[in-house]
Amino acid sequence: GGRLDIAAAARLGAGFQTSLPWLPVQGACLYQSFLLLDILACHDLRADWVFAVRTWPFAAHCWVQAGDVVLNDTVDYVSSFEPIMVV
């Protein structure tokens, strides 16, 4: 559920990014994305959870995106990955 309000999601995403140094797990994209999706849901906002891989060197990554706006990462970094699932 929820509504797609890219501007509101981007504001919450920016606030979330600011709080990252105080999270108990720093580098866990899965954990951070889950938390951000929960925060967005509390504000009746929806976004996509993007799961992606790259082949060389192999890596897996995920992030939250509202429309074309990446909420908890940088476009430069996620552009090196190929999305394999969006939920």
Image: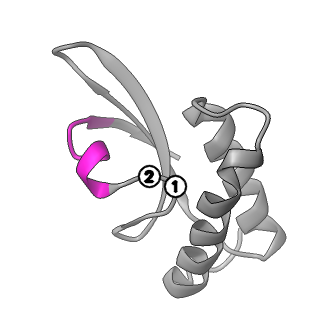
Residue closest to the eye, 68 or 20: 20
Residue at 57% over, 70% down: 14
Tell me residue 78's x, y (percent): 31, 45
Badge 1: residue crowd in 10 Å (few <14, some 14–19, many ≥20): many
Q: Is residue 81 magenta?
A: yes
Residue closest to the eye, 83 or 33: 33
Q: Which residues are magenta?
A: 75-83
Tell me residue 77's x, y (percent): 29, 44
Is 6 left, or right, of 55 in this rendering?
A: right
Is 87 left, or right, of 80 in this rendering?
A: right
Residue found at the very far front of the displayed protein = 21
Tell me residue 31's x, y (percent): 68, 35
- Image quadrant assignment for residue 16: bottom right
Residue at 79% over, 34% down: 24
Name the element at disc 1.
loop
Residue at 44% over, 52% down: 73
Residue of label 1: 72
| Above or below, 5 relative to 46 | below
Q: Is residue 54 magenta?
A: no
Amino acid type for the residue under numbered disc 2: Asp
Residue of label 2: 73
Amino acid type for the residue under numbered disc 1: Asn
Residue found at the very far right of the displayed protein = 42
| Above or below, 52 relative to 44 | above
Q: In this rendering, does residue 46 appear at all?
A: no
Tell me whether the residue at label 1 lies in contact with that at label 2, contact meaning CB atoms closer than 8 angstroms: yes
- Give the number of marks: 2
| Above or below, 55 relative to 77 | above
Residue closest to the eye, 87 or 52: 52
